[in-house]
């Protein structure tokens, strides 16, 4: 099957939680007299890097596709059994949710990729290459479901996609059309609409009475009676509609304009969010370049788009003064004065509650804790939210504690493509955290640069990532690339008794970490990875090292800590211990480390992290 370059990659992970009597040996494990297996399914959406708990609690979002051109979006589905016994799937099917009885089934499983049923997946095995298709035949928002039946339960996952109409604007030889980008005489520009409605309007200004334009072709029958200099084209339903326009001065295109603009519509960001939440025609807040000083907090909210409630409100920065260009994806973009969108805040940006789903994002900002601000985290995800933090430069600060991002109370946010610095503290026994994870939170931390900052004073501690109380983050691809300097750095706690940690996990949580560069930092004692009191790691293809300190260790396993998988890692610049166990002491020879885990793939030099697969695999 042809997979286009623009195809969106996704994986669904299906795990089986089983009960069995297990006998461990030096060569593996054997299962004796297993009882009837009862499976449990967990979905992980890797397009959004968004972990979704089992059941009908997530959406597989297809892309926006043009109607009438045979365009389609195809997403791969992988099913993996991570339990200790077989997982039996008895049925699997896709359903399109129709608003009209004669609507087509636009979601489907592609012929030839459907597995034979019943399907029994052995422990640890994966079934790949089942492909789902979205092929819209009309414009608008569409939904569907994937149903998966096991021997004991039925699970479903929502599907969504958008069909778009396309309108091609062509400049007539007698005039030039000026849009956010220019269309010269005889050239064209495609624009799209999810509703089939297009608005065309002359630019406003003190010379508005001299602005004029006319449609050369096609002839519009019985046009609406819009305001002056505005024409509405409703339900363009051809495969390709070419609209030839003669503009005597200039023209702008506004497709429903579903945004609240800062500072044009609202002077501050919180007011813009509140206004967007109260207006069922608005879907997002967009913020022009500039500096916005905030005393107190910013609270992310849901909105009222259309008849549906609980539609998350994203907040986007990085627009230039003319709203014609947005540039935000690299730190250099975010430092460019033409696009830099700064939020100086004394409090926190808060996203709380399951209603704040993965459509709620804070994206494209330079976010800084303002002098004199409180010790709370700069960004807080709370109470089962699945909101996102994307493409931001974040610098925290505080006296006794300084926290870049805090995920707590079962929050499962997406944290991706950010530069996060825990900032600086000055008090004795203070603590700094790039990302702090507590109370059952399960964030996905993907392709960030994370620093534990600088914990000043005596007996202080700095952490790149800190995870506590049964949390289960996924930490993936936080490592340098050819164009950006990603990685996890433990920071500096260089005062007397100071300690720095790249990743620290405690109290019965687990972290699956792969393709990361993990540096323990430069504390008085520096540790790249530490697992304690029931916390455990699975580590695949990471670089594990330290940056300084008088005591420098790679992986430390404290009391009741565990490392369950340890393959393909590079461990170096850790002269005091490549691996240290609470009861077993320190290992400084890589052969001893490999012998412990019955592998031969770990090295005492850096490994190539660029080999990370493009799809994000759970294990």
Image: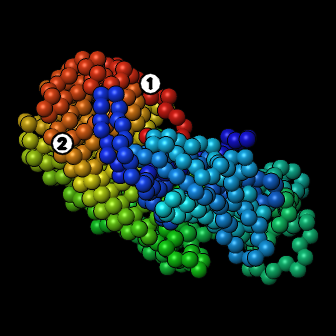
2 or 1: tag closer to the N-terminus: 2
Does residue 410 appear anywhere in the picture?
Answer: yes
| Mark 2 surroundings within 10 Å by alpha-carbon count, few (fewer than 14), some (14 through 19), many (20 or more) | some
Instruction: Say which element carries label 1.
Output: loop
Task: Count how many numbered circles sit on residues in the image.
Answer: 2
Gap between marks 2 and 1, in whole Å? 31 Å
The quarter holding residue 576 reads top left
Name the spot of residue 253 as percent of width and height, x first: 71, 64
Q: Residue at x 18, y 42 (%)?
A: 560
Q: Quadrant of the N terminus?
A: top right
Q: Is residue 168 left or right of residue 453?
A: right
Colouring method of the image: rainbow
Q: Nearer the viewer, residue 432 or 585?
A: 585
The quarter holding residue 212 reads bottom right
Q: Nearer the viewer, residue 67 or 583?
A: 583
For residue 3, above or below residue 591: below
Q: Is residue 608 left or right of residue 455?
A: right
Q: Which residue is mark 1?
A: 608
Q: Nearer the viewer, residue 173 or 145?
A: 145
Name the spot of residue 534 as percent of width and height, x first: 21, 46
Q: Is residue 40 left or right of residue 225?
A: left
Name the spot of residue 370 as percent of width and height, x first: 28, 56
Q: Nearer the viewer, residue 21 or 359?
A: 21
Q: Residue at x 55, y 54 (%)?
A: 89
Instruction: Say which element carries label 2.
Output: loop
Q: Residue at x 35, y 52 (%)?
A: 19
Q: Residue at x 87, y 50 (%)?
A: 186
Q: Which residue is mark 2?
A: 560
Name the spot of residue 109 as percent of width and height, x first: 68, 54
């Amino acid at each position: 099957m042809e997979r286009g370059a623009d195809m969106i990659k996704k994986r669904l992970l299906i795990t089986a939680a089983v009960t069995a009597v297990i006998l461990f040996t030096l060569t593996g494990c054997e299962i004796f007299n297993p009882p009837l297996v009862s499976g449990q399914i967990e979905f992980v959406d890797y397009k959004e890097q968004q972990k979704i708990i089992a059941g009908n609690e997530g959406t597989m979002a297809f892309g926006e596709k043009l109607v009438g051109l045979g365009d389609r979006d195809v997403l791969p589905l992988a099913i993996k059994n991570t339990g200790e016994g077989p997982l039996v799937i008895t049925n699997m099917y896709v359903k399109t949710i129709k608003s009209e009885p004669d609507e087509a089934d636009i979601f489907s499983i592609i012929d030839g990729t459907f597995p034979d049923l019943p399907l029994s997946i052995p422990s640890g095995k994966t079934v790949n290459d089942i492909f789902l298709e979205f092929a819209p035949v009309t414009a608008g928002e569409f939904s569907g479901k994937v149903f998966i039946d096991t021997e004991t339960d039925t699970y479903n996952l929502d599907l969504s996609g958008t069909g778009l109409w396309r309108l091609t604007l062509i400049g007539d030889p007698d005039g030039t059309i000026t849009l956010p980008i220019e269309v010269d005489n005889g050239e064209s520009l495609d624009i799209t609409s999810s509703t089939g409605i297009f608005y065309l309007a002359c630019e406003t200004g003190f010379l508005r009475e001299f602005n004029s334009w006319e449609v050369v072709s096609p002839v519009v029958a019985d046009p609406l009676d819009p305001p002056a200099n505005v024409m509405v084209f409703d339900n363009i339903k051809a495969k390709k509609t070419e609209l030839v326009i003669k503009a005597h001065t200039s023209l702008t295109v506004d497709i429903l304009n579903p945004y609240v603009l800062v500072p044009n519509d609202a002077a501050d960001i919180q007011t813009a969010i509140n206004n967007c939440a109260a207006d069922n025609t608005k879907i997002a807040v967009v913020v022009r370049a500039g500096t916005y000083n905030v005393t107190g907090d910013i609270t992310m909210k849901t909105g009222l788009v259309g008849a549906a409630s609980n539609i998350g409100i994203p907040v986007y920065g990085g627009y230039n003064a003319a709203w014609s260009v947005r540039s935000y994806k690299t730190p250099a973009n975010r430092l460019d004065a033409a696009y830099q969108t700064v939020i100086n805040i004394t409090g926190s940006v808060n996203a709380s509650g399951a209603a704040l789903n993965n459509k709620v994002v804070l994206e494209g900002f330079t976010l800084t804790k303002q002098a004199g601000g409180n010790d709370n985290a700069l960004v807080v995800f709370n109470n089962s939210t699945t909101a996102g933090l994307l493409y931001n430069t974040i610098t925290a600060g505080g006296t006794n504690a300084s926290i870049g991002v805090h995920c707590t109370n079962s929050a499962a946010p997406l944290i991706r493509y950010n530069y996060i610095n825990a900032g600086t503290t000055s008090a004795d026994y203070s603590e700094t955290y790039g990302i702090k994870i507590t109370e059952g939170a399960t964030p996905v931390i993907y392709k960030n640069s994370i620093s534990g900052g600088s914990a000043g004073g005596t007996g202080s501690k700095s952490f790149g990532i800190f995870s506590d109380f049964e949390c289960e983050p996924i930490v993936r691809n936080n490592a340098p690339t050819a164009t950006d300097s990603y990685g996890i750095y433990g920071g500096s706690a260089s005062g007397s008794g100071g300690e720095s940690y790249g990743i620290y996990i405690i109290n019965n949580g687990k972290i699956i970490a792969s393709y990361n560069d993990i540096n323990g930092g430069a504390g008085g004692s520096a540790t790249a990875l530490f697992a304690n009191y029931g916390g455990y790691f699975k580590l695949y293809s990471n670089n594990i090292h330290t940056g300084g300190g008088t005591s420098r260790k790679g992986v430390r396993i404290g009391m009741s800590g565990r490392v369950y998988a340890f393959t393909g890692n590079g461990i170096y610049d850790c002269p005091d211990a490549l691996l240290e166990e609470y009861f077993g002491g320190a290992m400084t020879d890589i052969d001893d480390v490999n012998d412990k885990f019955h592998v031969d793939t770990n090295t005492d030099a850096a490994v190539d992290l660029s080999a990370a697969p493009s799809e994000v695999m759970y294990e």
